[in-house]
Image: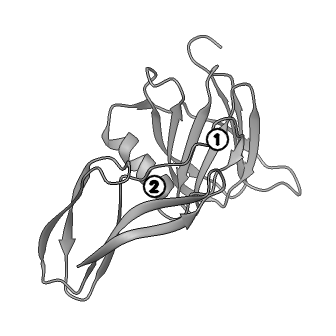
Amino acid sequence: MSGGWLPIPGDCSGDLRYSVIILNEVPAGRYEVSATKIDGYSDNSLDIDGKPGETHPVALGPKLPSCEGVTGLIDEGPLAAGMQIYRVAIGSHQSLPAPEQLSIARGENPGWTIENATGYQVDLYLRGPVERHYQIRKGDSINVDLPPGGYRIAAKLSNESVLPFYAVRELGGGTRWKSHLYIGNP
């Protein structure tokens, strides 16, 4: 078993680091992998089914850069969005309302148009054919092109008293999603 800190370049505040543990050629069996508070990382643990000859990268407790006030794509490196989606999915969350499904116009790509009317910053995480993290400032909108396919989606608001949102959605090849995110009455 090997592990260590892997530097990943980030757009917002220099290098983003997260713990990666790789199980190399372990005997078949169940292993518990854990990390404790190191360099500001959260406690975290998970179980892995180890099989001979397999390598298992496992990201534990990423400390995300501060990108407050940015609207757009946040580059955090591999696995970061998936980790956030996993945390939302296994914790208390609410269902992300279904987007409006629109047929794409000639020359338009499949994707998602999102308007943030929540009154808070929204961190939107997608994992599917691509893995992405978008931040949307309150009152801003984004238009993103996405490859068709199945997506696991999580959305967290900067107001932590609002439960995060989670959904699994299928984006069709001739479809564009449109969402108006709000809290309470629109």
Q: The C terminus is located in which quarter?
A: top right
Q: Which residue type does callout 1 highlight?
A: Gln
Label 2: few (<14), some (14–19) or many (≥20) C-alpha neighbours in 10 Å: many
Q: Is residue 58 left or right of residue 182?
A: left
Residue 122 image point, x, y percent: 60, 33
Helix, strand or loop at label 1? It is strand
Residue 60 image point, x, y percent: 34, 57
Find the residue positioned furthest to the top.
185
Residue 98 is situated, as x and y percent measured from the top left of the image, at 56, 34
Q: Residue at 18% x, 83% y: name it.
A: 26
For mark 1, what is the residue?
Answer: 135
User: Which residue was labeled with disc 2?
Assistant: 82
Which residue occupies the foreground of this view, 171 or 126? 126
Q: Quadrant of the N terminus?
A: bottom left
Q: Quadrant of residue 28?
A: bottom left
Q: Give the image location of residue 78, x and y in percent.
A: 51, 65
Disc 2/disc 1 C-alpha distance (Å): 15 Å
Q: Amino acid at mark 2?
A: Gly
* Residue 107 drawn above or below residue 156: below
Left or right of 143 on screen, residue 164: left
Residue nearest the observer in this picture, 7 or 125 = 7
Check the image and tell me how it is coloured: one colour
Circle 1 crowding by C-alpha within 10 Å: few under 14, some 14–19, many from 20: many
Number of the front mark, 2 or 1: 1
**Are circles 2 and 1 on residues that touch, CB within 8 Å?**
no
Secondary structure under tag 2 reads: helix
Residue at x 45%, y 50% (from the top left corner): 63
Q: Which mark is first along the chain, 1 or 2?
A: 2
- Tell whether 24 sits left or right of 11: left
